[in-house]
Image (tube, helix red, strand yellow):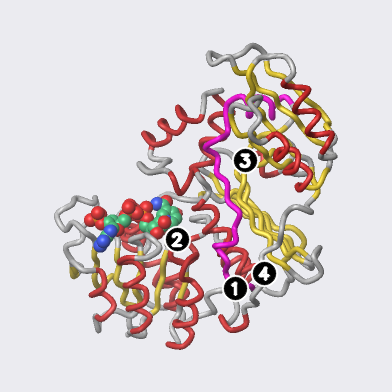
Amino acid sequence: MVEPLNIALAGLGTVGTGVVRLIETNAELIARRAGRPIRIAAVSARDRTKDRGVDLSSYVWEDDPAALASRSDVDVVVELVGGSDGPALTLARGAIGQGKGLVTANKAMIAHHGLELAAAAEKAGVALKFEAAVAGGIPVIKGLSEGAAANAIERVYGILNGTCNYILSTMEDTGADFGDVLADAQRLGYAEADPTFDIEGVDAAHKLAILAAIAFGVRLRFDAVETMGVSRVKAADIEQAHALGYVIRLIGTAEIDRSEGDMRLYQRVRPHLVPVGHPLAHVDGPTNAVVAEGNFMGRLLFQGAGAGDGPTASAVVADIIDIARGEKGAAFSMSAGELEAMEPASTGHRVGRSYIRFTVPDRPGVLAEITAAMRDANVSIESLIQKGDPDDDGEVIIAMVTHEVPESAVNAALHILEGSDSLTVQPLVMQIIGE
Ligand SMILES: NC(=O)c1ccc[n+]([C@@H]2O[C@H](COP(=O)([O-])OP(=O)(O)OC[C@H]3O[C@@H](n4cnc5c(N)ncnc54)[C@H](OP(=O)(O)O)[C@@H]3O)[C@@H](O)[C@H]2O)c1
């Protein structure tokens, strides 16, 4: 008789209950694929009395998730509590320290402590797996670390946050403003009660830093991701972008930058203008998509559900099946000691077209002041639209698209305009990506 793989689940929320349902529903198939049954031995969450829509009566309950790490009847701990530190990190360290495999969906914890946990897992000879931490149900970590393992990957980019993508594509479809769509998204469960991490780009930055480490074989540098979210995007920007043949998407990009002599790590999360013909322009709603470019494989596109109980549980259980098969692998696709330390790239020299939105008082001279600043900073303007009638505050919008210029030139122009009473709101700059 084959011994089951015994797991403990910490966290029985959206993902945790999804994992319970999946393991119960597909038990037989999973046992055949894994070569042994997967058995839930123990579970933990905050509130034992909560009705979670799944029957937990046959599992041992621990009030303290940390207690799961020391149970002798547990081989693998599955951390689905969340948060970069606190109980999740205590449990992760405890589980690895006790020689147990660790599976987690926690991008915040991996982005902040992934290197430490990977080194500890290697030392203890146990698996650390986090497929669900990046792009939910899309097997992008497996795709990069296994399927693309033979390639030098120099660029990975994509739509990494379903909440932002839902908001932007809904603004596009309905013409509604950011705040209204966010409120709807919260009501429909596409956005958290506290949406800050999502809408300010932090969640996408967590995922991007993890992807970059795996794709390039570099030490994870979440602190070096330049991050801007979508909360400043207005319906007017979406309208202008549309008129110019673009949609707006929050794109995370990581790249090896050689322009400063040595190899540097470029990581940025920002709203971009994406041409309507680009594959990422057709990624709508809460969907995620990741593009990776390798020197032999060419361009790969991964697309699918970036969140939700089913897709995320699917990725978590795939990791558990790997461990049941005896596949430990290296957390970041190579030994933690092999990961290269790479300094962050500066961005001023990057050349491209930018969209700049100015919010200005409706009076003479303002446009002249803006265009003079552009001229003085050597930013040549491709198009400029002043948008219709002033709003209730007497303000109008000027949307400008630059020719290909270094980002430093755009920054210099905005620096000239700093403090000017012609600008009532800080200008919004979004890069335009090519076809
Ligand atoms: N939701 C998604 O679609 C998704 C997608 C990809 C990755 N993830 C990641 O998966 C993880 C879990 O997300 P989720 O959406 O399932 O979260 P969730 O619905 O908020 O569930 C969190 C669970 O953790 C438990 N918990 C929270 N604090 C605890 C504490 N101090 N001690 C013990 N248990 C505690 C909660 O217990 P109670 O239920 O008793 O309150 C709850 O069961 C996070 O790292 C998240 O980033 C989620």
In the rendered structure, which disc, 3 or 4, sits on the residue that comes first in sequence? 3
Closer to the N terminus: mark 1 or mark 4? 1
Q: Amino acid at mark 1?
A: Arg
Q: Which residue is mark 4?
A: 343
Q: Quadrant of the N terminus?
A: bottom left
Q: CA distance from mark 1 to mark 4?
A: 10 Å
Sequence-first disc among 1 and 2: 2
Q: Residue 233: x and y, percent?
A: 58, 33
Report the residue marked by disc 2. Answer: 108
Disc 3 from disc 4: Cα separation: 27 Å
Contact, CB < 8 Å: mark 3 with mark 2? no
Q: Residue at x 61, y 13 (%)?
A: 390
Front disc: 1 or 3: 1
| Cα distance in 3D space between marks 1 and 3 | 27 Å
Q: Dot 3: few (<14), some (14–19), or many (≥20) neighbours within 10 Å?
A: many
Mark closer to the observer (1, 4): 4
